[in-house]
Image (cartoon, rainbow, N blue to C red):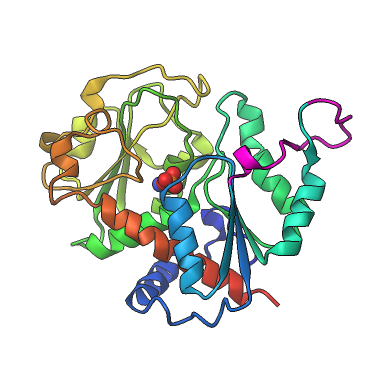
Amino acid sequence: MKHYLSINDIDSVSEWVEDALTLKKDPFASEKLGKQRTIGLLFFNNSLRTRLSTQKAALNLGMKVMIMNFGKDGWALEFEDGTIMDKGNAEHIKEAAQVVSQYCDILGIRAFASLKNQEEDAAEVVINSFKKYASIPVLNMESSLSHPLQALADAITIEEYKKSVQPKIVLSWAPHPKALPQAVANSFIEIMQLQNVNFTITHPEGYELDPKVTKNSRIEYDQDKALKDADFVYAKNWSNYKDYGKVINQDKNWMITQKKLGGAKFMHCLPVRRNVVVEDAVLDGNQSLVIAQANNRTFAAQIVLKKMLETLK
Ligand code: CP
C-alpha cells in the first residue's frame, strides 16, 4: 500500500480490524518499524482527536512526528497550474509538496470541504495535489469527501462491542447550527457496506447524500422506524448535498434522546454539540461509546501507518 486516502485503500476491512485489535493489546510490538522515519502532519483545519491520536500512533511505532498548522502558519498555497501568482497566494503546491517530501517519509493531510463549491470539493484539490506532487505516501486525516481513519476506528469499536454476528446499525442525521461536511457520514457508510451488518441510514427528506456513496444502502425517512431494535446508533450531522453546503433543517426532533436510543449503543465521532445532536443523558450514560471510539482512533491510525511503513523502501 502507498497512500491511505479512502476506505477503498483497505484490502480487507475484517483483517485490518482484527490486526488493529491485536496491536491494541501490545501497542509497542512494532516500535522498531518506524525508527528513523518521520511523519509530517499538515493541518488546514482544527483537530483534537486526529492530531493527537495520529501522533500517538506514530510514536507507538517509533516514528518522529512533525506537525504544522498549515492553514494558519504556512504560506497561503496556490493550487492552479499556470497561474500568475501576483495575488495573495505566496507558494505553489508544486514546491510545497516536494519540499515537505524532503523532510518526511509519510505525509498526513487534513483539509475539509469548503462547502461553497461542490465541484471543487468533489475534486479534493488539496489532498489530491499533495498526492500528485509529493514523492512520499499521503495519509488522509479528513478530506472534503472522506474521513477513513474515523471510519476504521468506528469499525474497530463496533467489532469490540457487538453482541450478535450481524448487528443492526443505524446512521442518523442529527441537527446542528453550522454547516458541516459530509466526510464522516460518507466514510462510515462506505465501511458499513463492506461489513456483515444490517445497516440503515435515516435523515429528513432532502438530506440525501451522494448516491455514489449510499448506493443501495437502506434509507428510512422515519427516524423512529429506523431506530427500532438498533444495536448501534451513530449520530452525525451533515449539511445538504443537493442544496450544497446549506443548513435547510434544524428540526430538534431529530436529536438523539435516551428514549430514542432504547437499548442501543450510541456512537459519534466527536466533537459533539450536547443537547443539540444528542442529549446529556445519552453521552453521560453507559450506552455511549464516544470515548471508546476516540481511543480506537489511535489503533486505527497505527494499523494504517504500520501498513504504510511496511511498503517503504
Ligand atoms: N473525530 C475527529 O476527527 O475529531 P477531530 O476533528 O478533533 O480530529
Q: Quadrant of the C terminus?
A: bottom right
Residue 247 appears anywhere in the view: yes
**Residue drawn at (36%, 22%) of the image:** 177
Give the side of residue 190 with respect to residue 115, left or right.
left
User: Residue 298: within the magenta?
Assistant: no
Horizontal and vertical percent position of residue 272: 31, 38
Horizontal and vertical percent position of residue 100: 72, 56
Residue 189 appears anywhere in the view: no
Give the side of residue 71 with respect to residue 159, left or right.
right
Horizontal and vertical percent position of residue 148: 49, 52
Residue 4 sits in quarter: bottom right
| Residue 73 or residue 107, whichever sits in front | 73
133 w.r.t. 79: above or below: below
Q: Quadrant of the N terminus?
A: bottom right
| Residue 40 or residue 134, whichever sits in front | 40
Residue 171 sits in quarter: top left
178 w.r.t. 305: above or below: above
Give the side of residue 260 with respect to residue 32, left or right.
left
Horizontal and vertical percent position of residue 28: 42, 79
Region rendered in magenta? 69-87
Give the side of residue 82 with respect to residue 271, left or right.
right
